[in-house]
Image: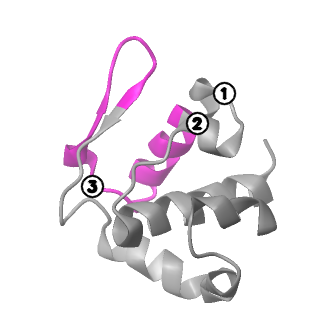
Amino acid sequence: MNITKRNKIVFSVLKELAYNDYTPKSEDYSILEDDYVDILHYMVEEGYLNSNRIIFNILGTAEVEMSMDLVTQKGENYLIENEAWNHLYSSIADYKKL
């Protein structure tokens, strides 16, 4: 997966979790579950998501616990820094327009 596609998915996941109260799935992006879990790992490692709110299990899947502190300040800053995408994105249905 190229970096641009990954960044679009990161933006979309953050937007959904922070503002739409929806936990996206790999199917929403037409990617493999393994790729989606890799993106969630990346988001935790970058500090965009609170690591205490995501459980990575031995089966290679992830469980996301919705909470007020799931998206970190750094994640909020990512959304602000990529504000141009906000003009095209209001929900998961708009992901492919990005």
Question: Residue 37 in the image: x percent, y percent?
Answer: 51, 33
Give the residue at x 36% y 69%.
18
Q: Which mark is residue 50?
A: 3
SS of the residue under disc 3 = loop
* Position of 17 relative to 85 (above/below): above
Alpha carbon separation for disc pair 2 and 1? 6 Å
Q: Residue furthest front?
A: 93
Q: Which mark is residue 26?
A: 2
- Which residue is label 1 attached to? 32
SS of the residue under disc 1 = loop
* Position of 17 relative to 78 (above/below): above
Query: How many other residues sit within 10 Å of disc 3, few (<14), some (14-19) or many (≥20)?
Result: some
Q: How many marks?
A: 3
Question: Residue 16 in the image: x percent, y percent?
Answer: 45, 63
SS of the residue under disc 2 = helix
Residue 48 occupies which quadrant of the picture?
bottom left
Q: Is residue 61 magenta?
A: yes
- Type of the residue with mark 3: Asn
Q: Residue furthest top?
A: 59
